[in-house]
């Protein structure tokens, strides 16, 4: 499409083209889009306002980000190797939040399983989990008392879920909960794909003094099936330093408590 054709696009056609451009590039600045479509920056801002109203993009200072949706619940073998370096960096940062005598709720995420591997020398810990990955990581540590949930076994996540597991968690008061999820978005919050796992996370969070979310940079500005919790229930969100400045801005603008590994 030449420059004349782009400048003559109807608003709906131009907005579709802007969205397609963002799908390819993840983000764009207003001035870049104005030059690309040969219209004024004011026109681009109106287009972005309309796309944001339709929850297709998220406007940032001077530009916009694509809102990606994630609907597939990956099995544990797929998740174990995905973003592994980032997960390990996040786990190392998360470990600094843990103190002697803590009673921890650890969910069935692979990022939290990386954290569990680092608990070998913190005295007098209690770990309550629904995850076989976490249990396998800590069960030989003499400093850790391990308590496992019963319930229905989810083979995809090697986790125990369901009413029995949720009821079991209600017996405890945790000093800290560490959890992860599939997606985080500055407007739609922390979301995940599986309702059974979401319910377990919600109970852990509700029974804890502090809830700390471990979310690598690949999960930002995405939306999954259902909300885990509002931001005001989370004391800290830890992510890796590979999250771009443009992706950070919508969260920082809303004073969402994000801690970076770098």
Image (cartoon, rainbow, N blue to C red):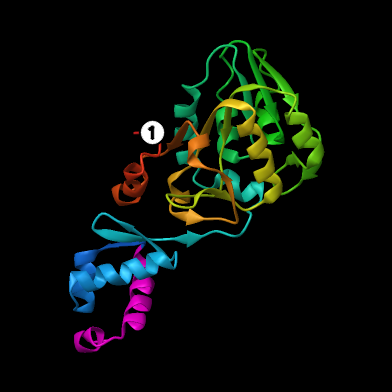
Is 107 positioned to the left or the right of 44 in the image? right
The crowd level at tag 1 (other Cα within 10 Å; few <14, some 14-19, many 20+) is: some
Judging by the rendered image, the residue that carries numbered circle 1 is 261
Q: Which residue is drawn at 63% across and 32% down?
A: 206
Looking at the image, residue 248 lies above or below residue 205: below
Looking at the image, residue 226 lies above or below residue 95: below
Is 106 positioned to the left or the right of 65 in the image? right
Q: In which quarter of the image is residue 58?
A: bottom left
Residue 151 showing in the rendered view: no
Looking at the image, residue 83 lies above or below residue 178: below
Q: What's the magenta region? A: 1-25
Q: Residue at x 31, y 72 (%)?
A: 47
Tell whether position 221 is magenta. no
Is 261 positioned to the left or the right of 246 in the image? right
- Residue 113, x across and y down, in percent: 60, 34
Viewer-proximal residue, 239 or 48?
48
Q: Which residue is drawn at 22% across and 84% down?
A: 7
Examine the residues drawn in magenta and state their main secondary structure.
Answer: helix
- Residue 201, x across and y down, in percent: 64, 38
Is 147 positioned to the left or the right of 54 in the image? right
Q: In which quarter of the image is the C terminus?
A: top left
Viewer-proximal residue, 249 or 36?
249
């Amino acid at each position: 499409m030449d420059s004349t054709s782009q400048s003559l696009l109807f608003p709906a056609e131009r907005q579709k083209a802007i969205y397609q451009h963002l799908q390819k590039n993840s983000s764009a600045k207003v001035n870049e889009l104005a030059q690309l479509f040969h219209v004024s920056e004011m026109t681009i801002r109106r287009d972005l306002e309309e796309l944001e109203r339709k929850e297709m993009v998220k406007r940032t200072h001077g530009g916009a980000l694509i809102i990606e949706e994630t609907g597939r619940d990956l099995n544990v073998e797929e998740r174990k190797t995905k973003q592994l370096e980032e997960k390990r960096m996040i786990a190392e940062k998360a470990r600094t939040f843990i103190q002697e005598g803590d009673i921890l709720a650890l969910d069935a995420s692979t990022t939290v399983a990386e954290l569990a591997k680092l608990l070998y020398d913190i005295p007098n810990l209690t770990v309550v989990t629904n995850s076989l990955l976490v249990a396998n990581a800590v069960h030989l540590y003499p400093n850790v008392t391990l308590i496992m949930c019963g319930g229905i076994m989810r083979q995809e996540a090697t986790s125990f879920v369901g009413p029995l597991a949720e009821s079991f968690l209600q017996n405890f008061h945790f000093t800290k909960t560490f959890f992860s999820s599939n997606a985080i978005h500055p407007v739609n919050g922390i979301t995940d794909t599986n309702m059974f796992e979401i319910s377990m996370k919600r109970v852990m969070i509700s029974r804890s003094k502090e809830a700390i979310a471990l979310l690598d940079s690949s999960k930002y500005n995405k939306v999954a099936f259902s909300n885990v919790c509002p931001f005001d229930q989370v004391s800290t969100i830890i992510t890796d330093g590979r999250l771009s400045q443009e992706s950070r801005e919508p969260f920082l603008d809303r004073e969402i408590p994000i801690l970076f590994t770098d």
